[in-house]
Amino acid sequence: DAKTTQPNSMESNEEEPVHLPCNHSTISGTDYIHWYRQLPSQGPEYVIHGLTSNVNNRMASLAIAEDRKSSTLILHRATLRDAAVYYCIPIQGGSEKLVFGKGTKLTVNP
Amino acid sequence: DADVTQTPRNRITKTGKRIMLECSQTKGHDRMYWYRQDPGLGLRLIYYSFDVKDINKGEISDGYSVSRQAQAKFSLSLESAIPNQTALYFCATSDRTGEETQYFGPGTRLLVL
């Protein structure tokens, strides 16, 4: 499994963009990059994933470096409901499990 | 209705007791998982099942057993509960797309006295 490095915590103000970084320098060529988040007292929730190209969905955008050794989750306008722990998880297609690290705790200030 | 449900949501038990946590899903997924989460830590995989006849150990299976009664049901048992099994337990499901998106239940908070 590829190892990941994420900041322990980050802060943002409401309605401002947030860029959550993740380093995954040992990622293999077939690993997808998944992002999940866990809101307080809830189970993890899928956010977005990608392989090589940048990806957008209704929740966020994922920017993947050209060498794939890092990625950035972008929340375009943070809301108070985005306060959560965000996990970056490289995983090989067809693999059996997600490996969760400690993630980044995002605090959103009103 | 939630796609992945867990019962009970909270449980207090005593050391040595056998307890079962249950997970049901209506997503029609073949793959199901059990994780535990300790305070301040990420999730760790206990067991997973790719279909009804397939059971696999995760990284922390000691002290736990599972049963896949049907495609939609996956139960986790603690044969003889001990205090360090106090944790938050999550069930998850995924389909076979190969892109490994998992969908999690709301969790069961277990306290072993």
Image (tube, coloured by chain):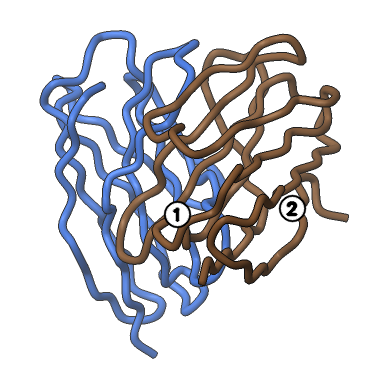
Q: In the figure, is residue A22 to the left or right of B66?
A: left
> Which percent across, then down, holds residue A49?
44, 32
Chain A image colour: blue
| Residue A4 location (% of width, % of height) | 19, 37
Above or below residue A7? Residue B65 is above
Element type at marker 1?
strand
Left or right position of B3 against B15: right
Which residue is disc 2 drawn over?
A: B6
The quarter in which the C terminus of chain A is drawn is bottom left
Q: Are marks 1 and 2 on the same chain?
A: no
Percent position of residue A107, x then y: 32, 76
Kindly identify the amino acid type of the residue bearing the numbered disc 2.
Gln
How packed mark 2 is, by other alpha carbons closer than 10 Å (few <14, some 14-19, many 20 or more), is: many
Question: For residue A57, what is the image quadrant?
Answer: top right
Q: Residue at x 37, y 23 (%)?
A: A91
Q: Residue at x 48, y 18 (%)?
A: A96
Q: Residue at x 32, y 28 (%)?
A: A90
Residue named by callout 1:
A37
Q: Farthest residue to the front: give it.
A: B16
| Subunit bearing disc 1 | A
Amino acid found under the numbered disc labelled 1: Arg
